[in-house]
Amino acid sequence: MPSENGRIEKRMPVFALVDCNNFYVSCERVFNPGLTGKPVIVLSNNDGCAVARSNEAKALGIRMGQPAFQLKKLMAKHQVAVYSSNYALYGDMSQRVMRTLMQFTPRMEIYSIDEAFLDLTAFNRVDLAEYGRKIKQTVEQWTGIPISVGIAGTKTLAKIANRLAKKSTKADGVLDLSAAKYQAQALAAVAVGDVWGIGAKSAAFLLANGIGNALQLRDADRVLIGKKMGITGLKLLDELNGVSRYPLEQSPPRKRSLGVSRTFRREIFSLAELSEAVSAYISAGAEKLRAEKAVAGVLMVYLMTNRFKDYSPYHSTTINLPVPSNYTAELIAYAKKGLREIYRQGQGYKKAGILLSDLRPETGVQAAFFDEIDRDKAGGLMRVLDLINGTMGSGTIRYGAVGLSRDQSWKTVFNLRSRAYTTKWGELPEVE
DNA sequence: TCTGGGGTCCTAGGACCC
DNA sequence: TCTGGGGTCCTAGGACCC
C-alpha cells in the first residue's frame, strides 16, 4: 500500500507453520479413542520400523526409525499399541485438516502430509497468538487432530516457533515469535541439529566449530557457513536473521520426477519375481503420471542389495524413451528390458524401484515418424483402465506382468493395519 | 530372521566445444 | 620438456526434508 511519502511500502511477511502432532498416531486415535494417553506407534512398510510415536511412546525411549524387532520386549512390557501404516486413512485425514486450515487464510502452502504454511501477512493488526489459538482449536474440534502453531517472519523461524510451541507447557501449542523481542532467547533454546535444513552432517560440522544452537548459527561467520554449506547455508542464515528467503509457494511447481520403490520382506534372487515387482511399480508410476496429465521422457530402473551388509552394490540403468510416455504396457516393456541388463544371477536383492523423470505435459508430445504405438488407442485404453480402477478399486484391472499369486514374496505386508475408516475402498492395491 | 518411501536442491566432475 | 581457458550440459551422489 502507498505510504505517506508515496512509496510502495513492502510489508514484512508473517508465516504460521501448522504441524499435526504425531500425525499418524493421532489419526489412529481419532477412530480409536481408547488409545488416548497410552503409548502408540505406527510402523513403516512391512512393519519394519517406527515412523510415528505418541508422546507416551517417545517417553519410553522409542526412537524415530527404530526397527520393530528391537522394540518387541519394550512394547510387550509397556503394552504399546502398534499399527501398520494406513496411508489411505492418513491421506484422507490430511485433506480434512488442510480444508479446515483454508478457512483461516486465502494464502496457504501444503508443505507435507501433516504440515502447512499459512501466510498471515495481512493479519498484522490482529493478535497473532490469539488467531493461532483459534486455528488450533478449530482444527481439533473439526477433525480430532491436535496441532501446533508457530508464527514468525520467516519459514525457518516459524519452524522454530512451532518446535518450541510443542515443547513448552506455557505456550500450550501456539507460539508467536514474530516480534524480535524474544527471538534470541528462543533461538538459544534450539539445538543446531534441530534447525530446519541442518541434518546430521552439517550439525556435526557446526558443533565442531563451536556452533551449538540456533542463536550461534544465526550469528555465525557467513564465510565459514557459505564455504561449507553453499547457498543453502547462506539462505538459512538470512532466514534466522528474519530475512525471508523462502517465499510461500501456493501452487507447487510441477513435479520433476516421480518414483516408486519398495523394500522386500526378504532377499529376492529370481528375475521372475523382480520382474513382477518392477511391473507393479511401473503400473503405479504410470497411473500417477496419467493423474498428473504428464508423460515421462526418461525411465530409470534400479536394484539394491541389503544396505545393512558391508557389501551392498546398487545397480541402475537409465532408458531414454523414444517417445515420452505414460502408457503402462510400453513402460513395462522397457523396464523389463532394463531389469534384465542390471540383474545378476545369484545376487540377493532387498529393494527395487523405478524413477520416471523428464516429466512434461501430455498434451503437446511430438509425434514420432516411426512410432510403433498407436498413441490415441493406447491413451483410450489407459483412460478405461483408470476409470475402472478408480470406481471399482485400485488393481481391479492390471497387467499380467504383475503376476497373479496372492502371496508374492515381493509384496509389502501390513499385518497390523487399522480399517480404512474414512475411504470407500478398504481393500488395498498391489502397490499403494 | 527382522531395519520405509518419495521427493527436492545443490555441487562436483567429466565430456565436449570453441 | 612444455600441454589454455572458459562455457555448457549432463550425471552421480550427497544432503536434507517429512
Image: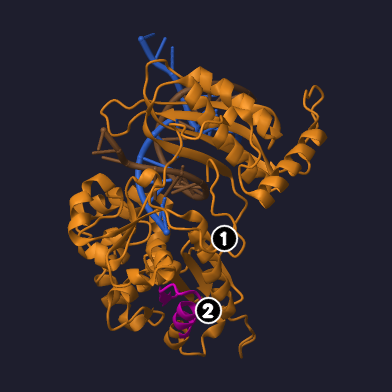
Chain colours: A orange, B brown, C blue
Magenta extent? A134-153
Secondary structure beneath dot 2 equals: loop
Observer-nearest of A216 and A25: A25
| Residue type (three-letter) at the residue carrying disc 1 | Thr
Residue A423 tag number: 1
- Check disc 1: other Cα within 10 Å, few if <14, some if 14-19, many if 20+: few
Q: Position of residue C16 (x, y in %)?
A: 37, 52
Q: Is residue A196 above or below residue A2?
A: above
Q: Same chain for the residues at labels 2 and 1, yes or no?
A: yes
* Callout 1: SS: loop
Q: In the current view of this chain or complex, which residue is farthest to the front? A: A406
Which corner quadrant of the image does residue A250 belong to?
A: bottom right
Q: Is residue A79 above or below residue A273?
A: below
Q: Quadrant of the N terminus of chain A?
A: bottom right
Residue A207 spot, x, y in % from top left: 21, 55
* Chain to which the residue tagged by mark 2 belongs: A
- In this rendering, the answer to whether A307 lies above or below A255 is above
